Amino acid sequence: MQLHIINSLEELAPLKRFKLKKHKFPWVTTIFRSKIKQKNRLYKHAKRSGSILDYEIYKQFRNDLSVKLKEAKNKFIMHKLKDITDTKVIWREISSMGLVKTSSKSPFNFFTPNMLMDHFEIVSKNTSAFKLEDLYDAIQFVRHDIEQFQFVNVDNVEIHQQILSSVSNSHTIGPDGISPSAIKMLVGSLTSILSLIYNYCVETSLFPDNWKKTHIKPLLKVNLPKSPADTRPIASLCELSKVFEKLLHKQIINYLNKNSLWDPFQTGFRKFHSTQTALIKLNHDVRQSVDKRKVTILVLFDFSKAFDMVPHGKLLIKLAKIGFSTSSLKLICSYLTNRQQCVIDVTHSTSSHWSKIINGVPQGSVLGPLLFSLYISDISKVLKYSKYIIFADDVQIYRDCVPSEIDHAIDKLRNDINAISQYAIDNDLKLNLDKTKILIMGSASYINNIEADTLPVITINQTVLPYVQHARNLGVILQSSLSWSKHVTYISSRVHTTLYRIKLHNNSLSVPLKTKLVTSLIFPILDYCCVVYNDVTVQLNLKLQRLMNSAIRFIYNIRRDEHITPFRLKLRWLTVRDRRKYFMAILVYKILFGVTPDYIKEIFELRRVDLRQSERNIKPQTFQIPNHRTSLYSKSFHIAAINLWHSLPTEITSIPALPMFKRTLHDHLLNNNTEDEC
């Protein structure tokens, strides 16, 4: 089938070799190029004649052409970007159109493909290779006392819908020689063939060898790399394989959900779970402890190359223990084993030797992250004294205590730290001790009285774990004093860098296009986990608002002394504070409709109805506000969200559909904003 697709494409749209020339802007059509030549002729004629009239004719023609070129450019770019929501894809598109500067440095300026491949090869060989006996060992653990998980056949409709919904329009050719756009173009004729192949794989528990090849495209981590370790591998897999994986992924997820097999605090790669929900849980617990006059000791673990080090035999045993049948284990085993990878240098049309992947789950795959989550989900069973949160390979444990008992609490944590260290050894994972840190959080008065030098020393393999004042956790910088100053500074740096990059063509971009760029590239930075730091101070909020104001000035070319509010309202944008309220209210709405993690829903308690109260005065779906004594807890997500929800009109909170709720909430916040913008 693979050759059939490639041959069909070769007949319909044959690949051609061509020499790379100077970059041509795609909006400059043949008509525009002829007009540019005409403009040049008018200029030469005016220069030769010396006539003022000829020069004015040239200027008029030049100015009209510039306006039309600018309009064509903006129209073309808007058409390219209008349906793209992925920030990475937008950066790639605007880079390809020459709108931003891109780094000219390539890993291949420093290393050959074979040098890079040798480095990536070493990582997967850190543990023993899979043997067929490992599969037989895993089958011994297959459970017959519970409902077993079996992969089932898929039909044509499922495959057709999966291709249309998930396959991109990219023309990048995969390891099998087929691009995603080609698959989408041929979806009508491919569906029935793929159905036969996919179902044959399910029935025989075999994964095609042609789909086990991976192209590695390395990126630089630093500007001047000293070794291949300073590069990051980006994996490109066969698209037909990824479609099949997505269909299998759905079946596994349905089984896990139906049988409640997820660890309750595993928040990675799960529906309704995110880094934001994980951080909300952590920050709620920390602020609740502050209200009880306690501090919280947080330990952030970091695993080195965790996805690449998973031993296949031990993974299969863990899958068997949660109910995977013999046939499903065999298919997963076939999927994981006998995989190959090579580093490719597209610019110079060269590649490294093919290398066999010994261990790990496939990078860039669909099933890989899910399989890793299942592999590490039993880590919580070794903990005795700590609360925990797991997000993929990011594991964090924490315990609260009164300040006078901090040494005792750290001793308890030491037991769990040692248990995780031993868990890593037993499961062939490696802790990155250089990035594993301890952060003690609480009110400023308690934190300032803690002398770090007197705290008990915790070591792993003779490496001392440092006590730090701040640490990045799932993309958000946490501070021991519960301030958000460092995180706001981090946001500010990223926004200014992004604005600087897209400002290079400021004068040639239209207002709608600049608006699209800001909403696609700046807003994700401002909005990321914004509900978590809802309790920022007035000064920090002002700093965040000024970032939005800078973006508005970029869009409209406004002077720094000109008032910004009319332009913000023209864009129908909320202030940064109201944006946080907007996302907070949406999260509360989802809590009421049961589409948030259980650990978030459990924070909120519905208000008990007083039977003596008049029915007309009872507001539907309201929450009980817990007793609290500190401002830190009163400004936390928990209480702030309840107060916000109670402040909204009933006609908004009672809307039954989320899209309508979002629109109405946005209009309400926009029309009721009284915040002064500087």
Image (spheres, rainbow, N blue to C red):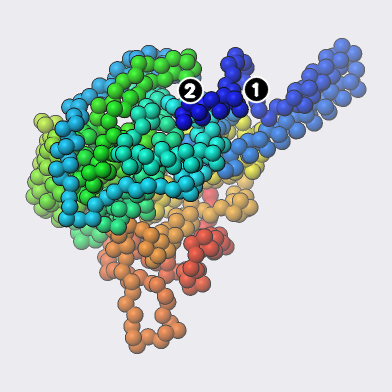
Q: Tell me whether circle 1 and circle 2 mark residues in contact (CB < 8 Å).
A: no
Q: Amino acid at mark 1?
A: Lys
Q: Amino acid at mark 2?
A: Ser
Residue 384 image position (x, y, % from top left) = 12, 51
State the CA–CA distance, disc 1 to disc 2. Answer: 19 Å
Q: Classify mark 2: residues with Cα within 10 Å, few (<14), some (14-19) or many (20+).
A: few
* Residue found at the very far top of the displayed protein: 48
The residue that mark 2 highlights is 103
Task: Give the label on residue 24, or none.
Answer: 1
Query: Which secondary structure, mark 1?
Result: loop
Place of residue 663 in the rendered image (x, y in percent of width and height, measured from the top left): 55, 60
Q: Is residue 410 above or below residue 610?
A: above
Question: Is 521 on the left or on the right of 385, as rendered?
Answer: right
- Which mark, by number, is residue 188? none
Lower sequence index among marks 1 and 2: 1
Q: Compared with residue 72, is residue 594 higher up or lower down, i.e. above or below?
A: below
Disc 2, SS: loop
Residue nearer the viewer, 514 or 257: 257
Q: Residue at x 17, y 27 (%)?
A: 128
**Camera sees residue 201:** yes
Q: Position of residue 66 (x, y in %)?
A: 75, 29
- Quadrant of residue 599 within the rendered picture: bottom left
Tell me which corner region of the image, top left, top right, bottom left or bottom right, holds residue 611.
bottom left
| Coordinates of residue 255 in the picture (x, y in percent) | 30, 53
How many residues crowd mark 1 within 10 Å: few (<14), some (14–19), many (20+)? few
